[in-house]
Image (cartoon, rainbow, N blue to C red):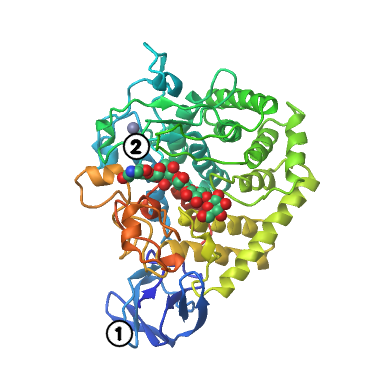
Amino acid sequence: MGIFLNQAGYTVNAPKIAVTTTPCNFQIIRTVDQISVFDGITTDGGFDASSGEQTYHIDFSALTIPGSYYILSGDKQKSPTFTIGNEVYRSLQKDLMKAFYYQRCGCALTEEYAGEYTHPACHTAPSVFLEDYINKTPNPASFDMTGGWHDAGDYGRYSTAASVALAHLLYAYELFPESFQDSLNIPESGNHLPDILNECLYELKWLLKMQAEDGGVYHKLTSFSHADFIMPQDDHSQFLIYPVSSMAVADFAAIMALASRVYKPFEPEFSETALQAARKSWKWLLNNPYIGFHNPEGSNTGEYDDTCDLDERMWASAEMLRTDFGFDNTYLEKLTEYVLSDINKTDFGWTDVSGLTLLCTLFDAKHSAGEKIENALKAALFTDADKLCSLIDAGGYRLGMEPEDYVWGSNMVVCNRSMLLILASLLSDADHASAYKNAALEHLHYLLGKNALGISYVTGHGDNAYKNPHNRPTFADGIELPMPGWVSGGPFKTPCDPKAIELIPKGTAPMKCFVDEVESYSTNEITIYWNSPAVFMTAFFNLNP
Ligand code: G3I
Ligand code: 9MR
Ligand code: ZN
């Protein structure tokens, strides 16, 4: 039961289709005066495999007058309120981006910038190598590894997760710079950098500390076990430098090459440092095989284990080629080898970063990779984009998702697919561009409430936004509402935390396997790389309403 729609709202000329599960007449009521401004009857939306529901569509695309509304059905169901207007995603984008500031580690969050979500500096003690910690080495070497963003609801900092989040943000800035003019009210605001670059610099400077002398990059910096549900400044556990993984090295080379390019006009010195760091890690990659990562016995912090590093290496080669063209022939050699192999080319998550290759290469104004590689990447992009469009037309909730796609962090899959469709839209002719754009937009609608639970998966945005993210400060700070602008991981078809297992009956349809409970880390955590693709999406739609 219910009427499900984007609770943040719709841009004026966007198609607007809400979903419900019973056929009915409907009216659209303007909230200022409670007057009905539009009416109609539902159409058959078909069976939706991911929700297990027969759906009906409420199409009000023809309503293009800006304002605030809700839908009232013949059987007296009322939808959440929504706005029509071309600025509807502006505060959303700002909050999604500001969220990264709240993750800053190693500095105090002051009232001026953090409002009520203040806390003193956290995790400022020196770190030691995991090996020394396990062997209880007397007087172990210790290092200043402070800074960066907390990864998620935990206090760890992980190189691959960091790189992927940074990539979504820096590419968003590179493609849609006009969308990042608003101040985020962070300590650096008003300086010579746009705030997205100020915020990313905080993470990049930390990430540089994760590079070893020989160009290797440590996989993660975490405590041995997750902290209790306490504020970050109260977590005094020893932070540990875990071993190098080849995924971390390749992601590092890629993100430093990208950063070197993006920061060059603003911070030439940092740009040069990033380039030198990238070259060093590239060399490491040429001389070393795949090195995986697993936690040692007894350690339960995030693993980000990955059995294949070819997609990371492919992305690194693309970025090195574009930023450092002409410096080293191996960039193009390697890129050619990977792109012409049969590895996937279209994912944007932390396990599979292959799509970032496409993002880097197809938007390179110098066309450093050449036509053959560009064509191979384009073919992969459009094949997948068209598949997603067919899925949207086949599913009642109009989403490029299948039941098996509801993995841990399914909202990232949703956002990543939207990114892919946005790229397809940017790279195609006017006719096709609008179809891909509308397909991408359906994913934003899903995230903000057009889903079988009618939940907005962004804190503070929507009448029925979730409120209890698995986030340590949210639990420990004693403040009623969570910080705004956090994307939840979302439905997970096989939830594996005790709270979700207790509350979600076996056999529940994938799209409904979610609980808004602070304990549910497998359905309701937050992370930097679930927010970052949402920033990418909203930056595009704010510029192209
Ligand atoms: O790779 C397989 C794939 O082959 C298979 O089809 C699919 C079906 O379920 O599963 C895939 O593996 C999943 C993997 O993520 C990659 O998507 C695992 O089942 C799933 O358990 C795993 O979840 C990860 C989770 O950590 C547990 O390792 C999440 O993606 C990842 O976002 C999450 O990350 C945690 C960090 O460890 C710690 N910090 C918080 C963060 C968010 O919860
Ligand atoms: O809180 C942790 C969350 O950030 C991680 O994503 C998750 C998987 O690594 O683990 C959570 O911590 C749980 C731990 O794994 C098991 N004991 C309960 C912890 C949460 O209350
Ligand atoms: Zn911290």
Please state which of residues 243 and 374 is positioned toward the viewer in this rendering: 243
Query: Disc 2 marks which amino acid?
Result: His
Name which residue lies at 46% across and 53% down. 408
Tell me where residue 283 appears, x and y as whole percent: 67, 24
Would residue 86 be seen by someone viewing this image from the given angle? Answer: no
Name which residue lies at 53% across and 67% down. 399
The quarter holding residue 383 reads bottom right
Would residue 121 be seen by someone viewing this image from the given angle? Answer: yes
Query: Disc 1 marks which amino acid?
Result: Lys
Residue furthest out toward the top = 139
Please state which of residues 230 and 443 is positioned toward the viewer in this rendering: 230
- The secondary element bearing badge 1 is classed as loop
The quarter holding residue 274 reads top right
Mark 1 and mark 2 lie on one chain; the one further toward the N terminus is 1
Label 1 sits on residue: 76
In the displayed structure, would residue 200 be above or below residue 89? above
In the displayed structure, would residue 36 be above or below residue 209? below
Please give left or right for residue 513 compared with residue 256 in the image: left
Establish whether ligand 2 lies closer than 8 Å to the Cβ of label 2.
yes
Question: Dot 2: few (<14), some (14–19), or many (≥20) neighbours within 10 Å?
Answer: some
The span from disc 1 to disc 2 (Cα, nearest Å) is 47 Å
- The secondary element bearing badge 2 is classed as loop
Label 2 sits on residue: 226
